[in-house]
Image (cartoon, rainbow, N blue to C red):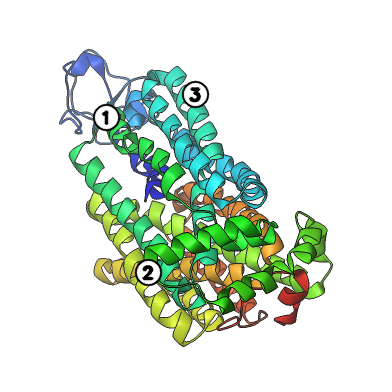
Amino acid sequence: MRQSENHLDGIVLILITLNTCAVPECELPNATFSLPKWWPANVTDYRCSRPVLSNTCVNNDVDNFETCDAWIYETKNSIVAEFELACQEWKRTLVGTVHNLGVLLSMPIMGFISDRLGRRTAIITSGLSLALGAFKTLSGTGSTGYITYICIEFVEAVLVTGTYTSCFVLIVELIGSDKRIIGAAAVGISVAIGELLLNLIVWYIPYWRNFLLIIYCPVPVFLLYTYLLEESMRWLLTNGRKYEALLLLQKIAHWNQFAISDKIIDDINNESKTTDLVNEEKFNTKLLFSSTALFKRVVICSWWWFTAAFVYYGLMINSVTLPGNKNANFALSSFATIPGEIIAVITLDRFGRKKTLLWGFLFCGLCCVANGFIQEYKTASLALFLIGKTSISVCFNAVYVYTSELVPTSARGSLVGVCSMLARVGTVLAPLTPLLRDWWHSLPTALFGCASLSAAVLTLATPETLRRPLPDTVAEATALS
């Protein structure tokens, strides 16, 4: 939930804020956002150009124009107003791009920490680093405040982003295969709830500095993780820490009030016999490319992750351009994630990982492409948009589970981190897609559709992993083919 707020606070705060060009000699100092009656009828660019008036403010056609140097904003609560970003659309979208560049750098770093120091250490480190976000409220105004803001945004993204990936890997390794999908869905639904909560907070607390202070208040809760969060037993075993794994098993048995049978002890002993082989492979990325099947799998997984992130966040960002209230549209887009997670829980175990991912990408692609041709039908367009968002949410859940089951334990954290890093290329590009509407209003959704359809085709080349044990070594992972 906290991770969703870290990812999306920039989207919420940098929403398009309408403005008009201020003409001080014709308006009061406290003028509100509206197009004045005296504005010349032939001046259609009222955001970035102002007419050169003679002695009076009259509604007559004028021939001379000049660039705006002052603006009246729809609201003064936004970053766009305080940092004076009117008529600088690239600066507004750059905030999301800078954040995702930080995420891009973070993924391999946190993946390495997750594999070397443990899933628990990576989660606690990332969680506590969220406190950096509160320093964004100390940014000044104007261009100086803008530079300070994006610098803090970048550093925060580098240190924080590993939370979600590390949590997911920990859940996959902690719970049984029959509950793995439910655990993944719980993570996804918590993200959607975080998005809805984020939208609710900004609705009632619109001033961006107060909003940031409130969403970063719960960060000290992560200190409790030091005492409450346990390490992955599978990670302990594959790192030769059998004694700690047995202690963890005893804790689990005590919490759940069951006795540890001799068979369970034997299974752990047998599991530990493979530790030497796993350790030989650990941190050797070249092993992933020693097998043609694994190399192909890495390439396909990377495109899945790129597409899922690009389309998911792209639809989220472009939801505010739909007709109607921006906050309501953003909330609907966030809510569409929840049925997607529920569908994933039902279909991943019933129909398999491969079919779920294939049909999810296919439905999303078709909805996005079709949406571009029915923009004039607002209700139908919104319905297809939300179906596409639900479909890509199914894929987001499935791609995490499927990728984790296609690669060995010896490099799972690193590979998931690398795939997530490549996905962040998609999130770097997603904030820029609204600019494409200047060429064609449906170009962003058409682009999302084509990416989804290509990912669906690539899914045909991967093996099914339903009811197969998690591979610990490269040989076991290759055997899935």
Query: Number of callouts in the render?
Result: 3
**x, y (%) of residue 471?**
67, 73
- Point 22% across, 30% down: residue: 39
Instruction: Give the label, 1 or 3, closer to the camera.
Output: 1
Q: Amino acid at mark 2?
A: Gln
How far apart are the alpha carbons under marks 1 and 3? 20 Å
Residue at point 56%, 52% (across, down): 119
Could you say whether the residue bearing mark 2 is in a helix, strand or loop? Answer: loop
Residue 275, placed above or below residue 6: below
Q: Say whether residue 205 is left or right of residue 247.
A: left
Q: Nearer the viewer, residue 454 or 5?
A: 5
Q: Position of residue 412 (x, y in %)?
A: 65, 61
Q: Amino acid at mark 1?
A: Asn
* Camera-side residue of 272 and 141: 272
What amino acid is labelled 3 in the image? Ile
Secondary structure beneath disc 1? helix
Q: Nearer the viewer, residue 212 or 406?
A: 406
- Is 193 in front, or is 267? 267
Name the N-terminal-most of marks 2 and 3: 3
The residue identified by callout 1 is 210
Q: Is residue 318 above or below residue 380?
A: above
Which quarter of the rendering shows the C terminus?
Answer: bottom right
Residue that label 3 marks = 147
Which residue is disc 2 drawn over?
257
SS for callout 3: helix
User: Residue at (63%, 82%) from the top-left corner?
Assistant: 460
Query: For the residue carrying disc 3, how many other residues have a C-alpha within 10 Å: few (<14), some (14-19), or many (20+)?
Result: some
What's the residue at 28%, 72% (across, down)?
380
